[in-house]
Amino acid sequence: MEPPVVLVRKNASFLVEKFEGILHTHHGKINLEELKYKNFGDEIKTHLGVRYKIAPFNPSDFFRHFKKTATPIMPKDIGAIIVYTGLTPDSMILDAGTGSGVLAAYLAYFSKYGEVVTVEKRKDFAKVARENFKLAKLKNIHQIVGDINFVADGFKKEFDLIVLDMKGDAEFIPKAKELLKVGGHVAVYNPYFEATKKVYEVMLKEDFKEVESFEILRVDLEHRKVGTRLKTKIWHTGFIVIGRKV
């Protein structure tokens, strides 16, 4: 067993990147040196005797444990993008607006024989994303620090999927169409009604097919002896617009 690993107790979890030092939790201190002699599925105890299970770090942990900068695309929306664009294990993907790298990491994992080119113009965001990619041990991500509007002119390959989470998304749609393979998709993520409508209209103007605009909502439930009710309020994250080049 090698790091990184995740220590799990009920709904709480901690990411451990090195088997050294002391981890401070609400339930006491954990000597991380002990992990050198453990296996996945084993337990490790705090100095107060509270037990945590040891689990491997896998994609379900990306969103929870990656370092964050800008607000990342939520897992529910990432799942929709993957399903509705027909991502395959060998897809060529362009991700414009890396942010913390959460989306790029999931795309790279599920397209493990393909490639993800991710572009971010903010150096501080790109640095955090690079650390996250290293943590996830993803080898098929190519990171570019720069403005997608200038970088795109240098691409020689066509893409199966282009995802935009950036300012000026609607203006980039014509260029995205040029970079797409026939049958490829563009997916745009935006938190605002007006901007989403603009993207939708530009996709229609550029003759994209199967254009759809939607929002995915998640509502958590709380289960008690007396019954089940909503645990959280319904809250908005972002809208997705998807179109296909045919």
Image (cartoon, rainbow, N blue to C red):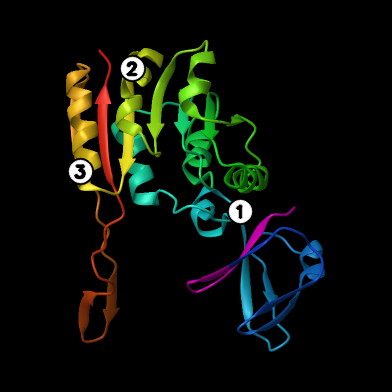
Kindly identify the residue that appears in the image at 44 percent across and 50 percent down: 72
Picture disc at residue 198: none
Residue 89, placed above or below residue 18: above
Instruction: Name the amino acid, label 1.
Output: Phe
Mark 1 packing: few (<14 Cα in 10 Å), some, or many (20+)? many
Who is closer to the viewer here, 133 or 197?
A: 197
Q: Quadrant of residue 117?
A: top right
Nearest to N terminus: mark 1 or mark 3: 1
Q: Quadrant of residue 123?
A: top right
Determine whether, in the image, residue 222 is placed left or right of residue 90.
left
Which residue does the numbered mark 1 point to in the structure image?
57
- Closer to the camera in the image, 128 or 219: 128
Which residue corresponds to mark 3?
Answer: 194
Nearer-N-terminus badge (1/2)? 1
Q: Crowding near pointer 3: few (<14 within 10 Å), some, many (20+)? A: few
Question: Which of 157 and 113 lies nearest the eye of the viewer?
Answer: 157
Q: Which of the two discs, 3 and 2, labels the residue nearer the N terminus?
A: 2
Give the vertical position of 13 relative to 55 (above or below). Answer: below
Q: Position of residue 199 (x, y in %)?
A: 24, 32
Relative horizontal placement of residue 240, taking residue 41 as reference (left or right): left
Label 1 to label 3: alpha-carbon separation? 39 Å
Q: Residue 220 location, x and y as percent?
A: 29, 67
Q: Position of residue 183 (x, y in %)?
A: 31, 15
The residue carrying mark 2 is 177
Q: In the structure shown, which secondary structural element does the residue marked by tag 1 occupy?
A: loop
Q: Which residues are magenta?
A: 2-13
